[in-house]
Amino acid sequence: MSYQRIAGDATAFIKKNKTTANQISYLRLLLAILEAYLLFIIIRDGSSTILVIGALAVLSAFFFFVNYHQKIIEKIQYHESMLKVCENEILAAEGVYEQFADGKEYLNKAHFYAHDLDIFGRHSIFQLLNRSITKSGSDALAHQLKFPFLVKETIETRQDAVEELSHKIDWRVDFLATGNLLEKDEEKYSQLITWLKSEEVDLLDKMKVLLWLIPAINTVILGIWITGIISFKVWLLTLIVQSGFSFVNRKKLNALYLKMSKNTPNLQRYIQLFRLIEKEEFKALVLKQGRDSLANPSYISAIIQKLATISAYFAIRNSFFSPVLNAFFLWDYQCAYRFELWKKQHSAALLEAFDVLHEWEVLVSIACYDFANNTYTVPQVSENVILDVKQLGHPLLKKNKSVNNDFKINKGEQIFIVTGANMAGKSTFLRAVGANLILAMIGARVRAERFVFKPIQVYTCMRITDSIDEGESYFHAELLRLQNAVKLLEAGQEIFVILDELLKGTNSKDKLQGSELFLEKLIQYKTAFGMIATHDLDLTNMATQYPDKIKNICFEIIIKDDKMTFDYKLRPGVTQNMNALFLMKQMGIV
């Protein structure tokens, strides 16, 4: 079923049931008026059997329709959420992603590549993917984008999971629609997780036998009183004495109840989401393992419902019957003990279940992105080929505005020097390679016809800025980035460097010499690969000195009859045309 079909069905349901809900509202009003009229007649003329039965029947009908109306409203809200999900995905298929959170809170200029490759923020890779329904799910997606998987088998199992979820359109819509109805309160969620992790409080310690002994004693005494052996006063006195136990640890019992009554409703909100995962059949290994973890030792939704039952029983302590129940059964202690037992048996499974849920949010996000871009390619993970791509484009560009290119790193090749005029497409190409590598390593499709790659740590140096607050110059900030790249190589890390205009913060002579020495440093390590964009054509002579390891590629411009055109196509060799002076003349600067 397509998003359009689901959206159409949801729209029809909403329209029909809003009409029904309005009709029930009017009916409730009429029933309320009729009930008031019957009560008025009873008060004025005195009650009769028919009037009392009539009043009770009207009151019963009123409460029935109140409950029925609430259920309809909940269904309408669910279908409205479903409609919103479909509308968002229809826009995503058209290349519109502004409806999704952009993850600007995860921006970190010090990260290996996140700032340079537009991973977070407005019009970012995160916004392209993000369908998170909880803050923790959003955190999980951000973490994977910052630290993608570097193991071939892990990436391939995630690809299988994403592929399966991308075809489960109805299930994904159901999952997102249900999740989007959750109250987005991260503070409550944090309190819930802290509560589940907290240590158990054993209120009775070694005196648990009292939980069974006192009710048994009371039952025996009750039987003795019924048989007339003792008087009622004696039985009542024993109850009063035993009720004294309920005042021991009163503060701890109150604190325990308050935390339970506050956190249980928060936990119950997740029942439906867990049920969606528990009841669905999956084939992909990652999905099956996640589902099985929710069903062991029993369904997580059932575990949560069990807690809700304990909490409901515990809440009876606020009723009129509380003194009697505490005297006869030690009711508060009975509930506290069952909660402690529940927590000991199930809290670890619940914490694991939430991790599974947040991972599901990430996989569903990627699956939605894959479905919206089903013409893109599922990458092929290799252990030997660093990168071999055909018709590679930047995932953030509109489909009708992207000029795609082929690129391959052959055996023995390490560094590619990219030259070209301003605006010719160098930086966009570098970012396209980097962004697609990150997508590939989290199990997503990439914008290419073919994409063979080896999982590798991406490291960039493109948008360096100085820092007045930290007293750090532009040049020093750039040197720190390059130093960190070398440290990774020295530690044996295989990295793919993407550098844009090395050593911009110094004079041209130092810049050339420093760039040459840095390239020589890189190719000393067999684990170093990547691309360096530059306007300094003298740097391309490095390809002559190291023809097997360093290659030149370029983007050309065409200047004819005082007109400049770009084709944005990648070519071998060194650019022959520059455009800075041409542009300055065109703009009347010189």
Image (cartoon, grey):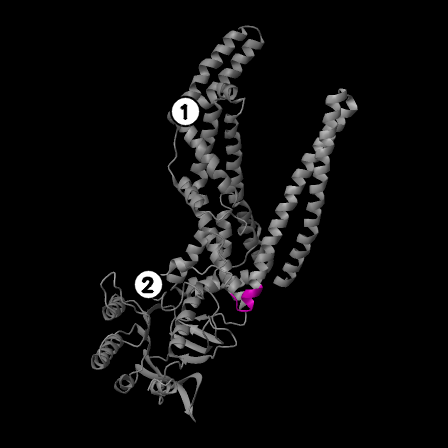
Please tell me whether residue 484 is drawn above or below residue 216 in the rendered image. below
User: Could you say where residue 220 lies in the image, as x and y percent from the top left?
Assistant: 52, 14
Residue drawn at the location 52% of the way across and 27% of the way down: 316
Q: Is residue 94 located in the magenta-colored stretch of the structure?
A: yes
Viewer-proximal residue among 284 and 34: 34
Disc 2: which residue: 111
Kindly give the residue lying farthest to the bottom in the view shown. 561
Please tell me whether residue 481 is drawn above or below residue 39 in the rendered image. below
Viewer-proximal residue among 486 and 219: 486
Residue drawn at the location 46% of the way across and 75% of the way down: 393
User: Could you say where residue 376 lies in the image, as x and y percent from the top left?
Assistant: 51, 72
Q: What element does badge 2 sit on?
A: loop
Residue drawn at the location 46% of the way across and 53% of the way down: 358
Residue drawn at the location 44% of the way across and 77% of the way down: 389
Q: Which mark is residue 315?
A: none
User: Could you say where residue 159 lies in the image, as x and y percent from the top left?
Assistant: 48, 64
Q: In which quarter of the image is the N terminus?
A: bottom right
Separation of residues labelled 2 and 1 (CA atoms): 51 Å
Q: What residue type is labelled 2?
A: His
Q: Which amino acid does label 1 sit on?
A: Arg
Please tell me whether residue 392 is drawn above or below residue 195 in the rendered image. below
Q: In which quarter of the image is residue 244?
A: top left
Relative side of 215 to 77, left or right = left
Residue extent of the magenta highlight: 90-96
Q: Earlier in the sequence, mark 2 or mark 1?
A: 2
Q: Which mark is residue 250?
A: 1
Does residue 148 show up?
no
User: Could you say where residue 11 lies in the image, as x and y percent from the top left?
Assistant: 66, 56
